[in-house]
Image: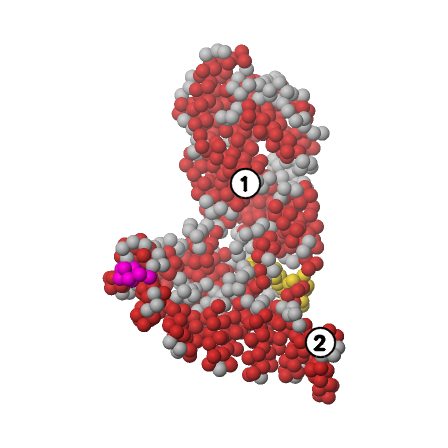
Amino acid sequence: MTMRGTVGAAVAAVVFAVPADIAAQSADDVLASVRQAYVEGRWDDVLDATDGGEVRALLLKLRAQTLLLTGDYDAAVRAVGGRNAAAPDPVVARVRGEVLLEVGDRVGARAAFEASEAANAPDAAIARLRLAEMAMYSDVRAAAFDVFDSFIDFYNSGAADTPDELLAVARAVTHLSRTNPALLQDALRAFDEAAALDPLDPEPRIALGDLFRQTYQTPNAYDEYGAVLDRNPRHPDALVGRARAQRFDGNPDALATARQALETNPRHPGALALVAALTLEAEGTREAREAAEEALDVDAYNLEALSVLAATYFLEDDLAGFERVVDRVDAFAPRYGGLHATVAELAVSHRKYREAVELGRAALDREPDLHEARGRLGMNLLRLGEIDAGRAEVEAGFEGDPYNPWFKNTLDLLDKFPEFTTLETEHFEIFMPTDEVELLGPLVRETAEEAWAALVARYGFEPTSPVRVELFPSSQDFSVRTLGEQGIGALGVSFGPTLAMDSPSAREAGEFNWRSVLWHELAHTFHLEMSEHEVPRWFSEGLAMREQRVRDERWGFKPSVTFFQAYDSGRMPALSNLTEGLVRPTFPGQVGLTYLQASYVFDWIERDWGFGTVRAFLDGYRDDHSTEQLVDDLLGMDMEEADAAFDAYLLDRFAREFASTGDELDDEAMEDAAGGDLVFAGRTDEAAIQVLREAVASFPGSFRFQLALGQTLLEAGRPDEAEPHLRAALDLFPAFAEPNGPLWGLATIHEGRGETADAAEALRRLGYLSETAWEVPLREAALRRELGDDEGERDALRRAAEVFPFQLDLQTRRAEVAERLNDPVEWVRARRAILGLGPVDLADAHFQLARALQASGDLDAARTQVLRALEIAPSFDAALELLLELRGDR
């Protein structure tokens, strides 16, 4: 059954659709005044209003809603006659039921709704909807959905002619959309009509925003919530709606917005439940439980709060506590799957993917038409490498939830999987684009197995294998593989048994180092399995970056002026709160800086306590110990002492860098010292240079002033004057890894003077500071070639190819220098890479690879390649000669 397109017998848009015989009376003026105060959030004016006589039901509704919105729940109950009213007045019974339902008195609410329905009160249809909603998760679920279905006839008959009744229709149709998603369009129409009947009423706007949010249209949701907040910036329901939309969008402001709602109503169950969920995502289990319990103090039956409360127990492995909450829900909503679905979602935020699969299945056992839970179950199966089973569940979820962008994006990505090939090694299944196998396959195999061996030796632990490694030639596809949506900005992710990451072809040359990322993500696999997925996010991220540096000092994030200034100004979290910097950054770039800061924690621990202590932390997390307990047991200090000790370690380790980049030399201070914004204006005239000289004279220990003056002089064509300032900057911050730093400038000066060896050495030093250096080693290689330094050129080209192997000229130069050095390993790698890049002359590419293989002693492989060359060019004389030579060798 479908809904008709227009409302019959619609009433005029007047004061909560007051009947015409009331509108002419003086009570109408009272109602209009109170209503305006309600819309604008002038709560006291609403509560001070006198009895409106014939419009008392409407005034009571406004008064009760005001008391509920502002958190005076006891007064709201008193306003509707108290909890134990024997025979509620049918005219106000429905409002009474709404209030009692809000405070968790389900028995009293049911009695009030039944009284309204039995008396055929003006709002009896709304009471009937509420009774059905109270039953929809019970064993009479089918009967509840029959009631929802009846609202279609109610609408089509023209009987739904007030905003409240249209809202009831929209809610009923939204419930029915589980079995017919097309009905969401009818729900949208009913919400729109309710809003049109009374444009000032906030409730239709908020409900419409909720519908947009639930159908993944957050820009439209923000518009609806914003329309309410424009009139009343403190409306807690609108703020909670906005916060939920922000959470969907991954906006770190979601928590602050939810807390803003609590400023109006400190006991708002929806806001408290959302705060609990957001806090739990950031691993704040104790704070989350407290917020959920506060919500339940108001409404002991609040399903959202009960679900988050259950998650706090589950994520602490307190299964008895978890089951107690499940029993509470089963007592009144045994067909509710949302609890297990919510816990599954929060388990994913704690990287517990197998548990999320089990929870998802439990949710569907209770509520089979919970389509989002089904699709998320599929995505979690995909994260565990169960591709066929995962796809089937995502397809089923998308069929029931066709607006879900995560499911659509994921299915679109899975449609591309036939373009990929799986390579098998001793410990890995490597899933990568077929057209990159020739070039990248051997490199990925080698890097993965090298990392496996190194990490097994370091941790004394061997994860379950094979580990699935997926490389994607599109960053958007990798992003979809990770979260189901595009644009997450990460480079790789570990789900434990499955790793996913960008292929180097997914980014521009110099954007990232794929080998370093693979090492980092595999380290996560070790940490997750060793701790049984109990390791905190900050710990695993910091330790994985530490492992990058253990393998190669160039790898991982490097300290920067931004890091030192942020830390020195107190904008970076303390050790005890590092997860906050990852999940709720407060300024752009803080996530990366927090990775770096967390990695230094393990430099500190390993230096002072040894790596065995790091392993002991992982064992402790596996045994359900908290960070506070482990710091006390393993480091011998409480968290406050650990915060102070780590702070002292950082300040001592980087004393020179803090002194030359610290908060006292922030941008504003620099501009003041330099007489304005000349420092960064790109000016090279004498006036600008003189201002910078004065700034350096005032702050000789400022890295940024010394560098700015050196760069400005160099750009002005005065390299001899620039050199001492660039060297001073280098002394102040020798690990500055950005390509526009002092080493790049010094290389330019040396090259201009013809001091080629010194220029090459400056570039080598700069290249070893950064894992993503691309142009730097290429420029160094060219200088090494001028010098006739074949070994230096080979090493520089190898470093460039490690960052971005997809350049034919680079690989050709690698092959040439390897041949000159008679380095068969490097020669074969370069020639394989050339072949994988699809050169124009394929016959020659096979022939040249055959020569390299011959030099390496792999004669069978060499013969295969020369035969392929001859298949393309049968009269290729050099190839024929090589084939005869190989036969003779055999």
Label placed on residue 218: 1
Q: Could you say which is closer to the camera, residue 173 or residue 507?
A: 507
Residue range highlighted in magenta:
684-691
* Residue at (54% x, 29% y) in the render: 204
Q: Which colouring convention does the figure follow?
A: secondary structure
Residue, disc 2: 869
Q: Is residue 35 above or below residue 658?
A: above
* Residue at (59% x, 70% y) in the render: 808
- Give the prevailing secondary structure in the magenta stretch: helix
Q: Could you say which is closer to the camera, residue 305 or residue 225?
A: 225
Quarter of the N terminus within the rendering: top right
- The amino acid type found where label 2 is placed reads Ala
Secondary element under disc 2, as helix, strand or loop, is helix
Circle 2 residues within 10 Å: few <14, some 14–19, many ≥20 = many
- The amino acid type found where label 1 is placed reads Thr
Residue 98 visible in this rendered orientation of the protein: yes
**Residue 442 location (% of width, % of height):** 63, 71
Secondary element under disc 1, as helix, strand or loop, is helix
**Residue 224 location (% of width, % of height):** 52, 34
The numbered mark, 1 or 2, whose residue comes first in the sequence reads 1
Q: Could you say which is closer to the camera, residue 769 or residue 18?
A: 769
Q: Quadrant of residue 849?
A: bottom right
Quarter of the C terminus within the rendering: bottom right
